[in-house]
Amino acid sequence: MAAVTAGPGQCVVWFGEPLARERKALAAAGWQLRAIPPGRGRDGIGLRAGDTVVGMLDLREADAAAAGHAAQLAGEYRHLPFLAIIPRRLAQAPALAPLLAQCRRHFTRAPDTEALIAAVTELAGPPAPQSTGGLDALVGRSPAMLATIAAIRKFAPIDLPTLITGQTGTGKEVAARALHDLSPRAGRVFAPLNCGAIPDNLVQSELFGHERGAFTGATARRTGLFEAAHGGTVFLDEIGDLPLDAQTNLLRVLQEGTIERVGSHQPVETDVRVIAATHVDLEQAIAAGRFRADLYYRLNVLRLRMPPVADRGEDIVLLAQHFLDRFRQLHATRARGFSAGARRAMAAFDWPGNVRELLNRVQRAAVVAESELISAGELELPEAGPAPGGRGLDRARIDAERDMLLGCLRDSGYNVSQAARRLGVSRMTVYRLCRKHQLPVTQLRRTGGRGH
Ligand SMILES: Nc1ncnc2c1ncn2[C@@H]1O[C@H](COP(=O)(O)OP(=O)(O)OP(=O)(O)O)[C@@H](O)[C@H]1O
Ligand SMILES: [Mg+2]
């Protein structure tokens, strides 16, 4: 726990429920605490002028509705420096996007909150054992993945719109974050928005903000995603779902670098890099009149293709082991690895849901695993037939090789040089074959081959 000097008037307004140990630690660090449990109004917060006040948005226990409500409430305190604990399942909730962007902005701009950040970050427990960002989050070394990673490295420093395509669950969002993390904008805001998750009539306001009174219910001016992400990156996920009128405005952002808030014709300068992603074929959407061709050409300057998992060969087992290891860091499970049958089943499967499906299956299997090795059945995958050539055949070939080697060694009195000459191979090869078949040749020479 970082040492924080107890100063007068240091207060955390905690939207959510701090744990007992968090309350204690904050008190010990000299912070007063005003907790606003989910669903409760802000009555009685009683902030005193001159206090150092920091907001804390804690959505660990919240569902999407509660998160929206908390975010709205916390939004009234946007002028405060804000910290947030957001579980991954909520991190994409559209209502949170601008607030999160705001949180990140304040993080870097409020030096007097550094100690609290240290304290609370520590309080929040060890960071989830996921990636440190950048390319570390992308597991894989198949040729398909290496090509993708090379493209990410090339595209990251170039401040041009980038379109990421790929089937569902192939890691488009992970790639978008990697592009941001490796770009000169790293450290600034990365603001994701799922264009398909917002009602059509709210998309414009979400993206570009609105003026007070712009429409019924617009009781205050609101900052949109593009303004909040100034200096950083906006990630427009499922761009194919963006309504046509919002497409027109997005086109202007890309052409002119300005936005207009809903209810205003005043252009506002904004400096963001736009990364968009889609799992639908935008060219088809254009043909069907659902997507503007000119916007497509503006977005599709750099194109990153995420390969389907079925094309990633050896990566499948690598990813599965990675997800299992991560699971083991958080939960008790017997499982340590995968049976040969499970590996074959994973290699043979089609993976329509790609990496996300693989992750889900591994987690489910880890929960139900009966032994150290997860089986195909536990992954709920059909048993794959034996490896090409047939497992039975393979075994027979291996046995025959071992018999031949052992016979030859016997005939040459376990003298490796002699056995090598007889077989027409090098001594190294004989040693390698002995290791492969677990024949301890030096020992055999001593014992005259007893036991083999
Ligand atoms: N190469 C990878 N290595 C490790 N984890 C990965 C990799 N690719 C994806 N993941 C994980 O798989 C899940 C799905 O990834 P992500 O959300 O980026 O996919 P997506 O392409 O955006 O999917 P969708 O189209 O459904 O939105 C996430 O949990 C992500 O962390
Ligand atoms: Mg996605």
Image: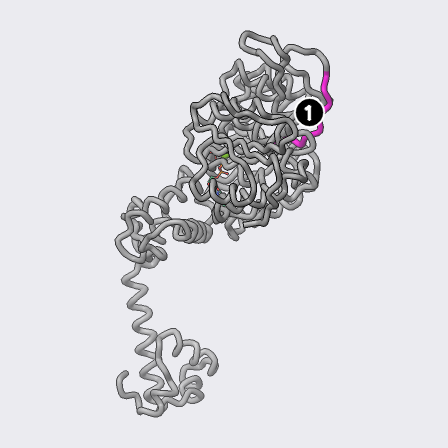
Horizontal arrangement in the rendering, residue 444 relative to residue 134 (left or right): left
- Bounds of the magenta segment: 267-275
Q: Which residue is mark 1?
A: 254
Tell me where residue 399 sits by quadrant.
bottom left
Q: Is residue 446 above or below residue 24?
A: below
Horizontal arrangement in the rendering, residue 164 relative to residue 420 (left or right): right
Tell me where residue 270 sits by quadrant.
top right
Label 1: element kind: helix
Q: Main secondary structure of the magenta part?
A: strand
Q: Is residue 254 visible?
A: yes
Q: Quadrant of the C terminus?
A: bottom left
Residue positioned 31% across, 73% down in the render: 400
Residue 274 in magenta stretch: yes
What's the residue type where badge 1 is placed? Leu
Residue positioned 52% across, 16% down in the render: 200
Other residues around mark 1 within 10 Å, as few (<14) / some (14–19) / many (≥20): some
Q: Is residue 282 visible?
A: no
Percent across and percent down for residue 15 are 49, 30
Percent across and percent down for residue 142 are 51, 51
Q: Is residue 87 above or below residue 253?
A: below
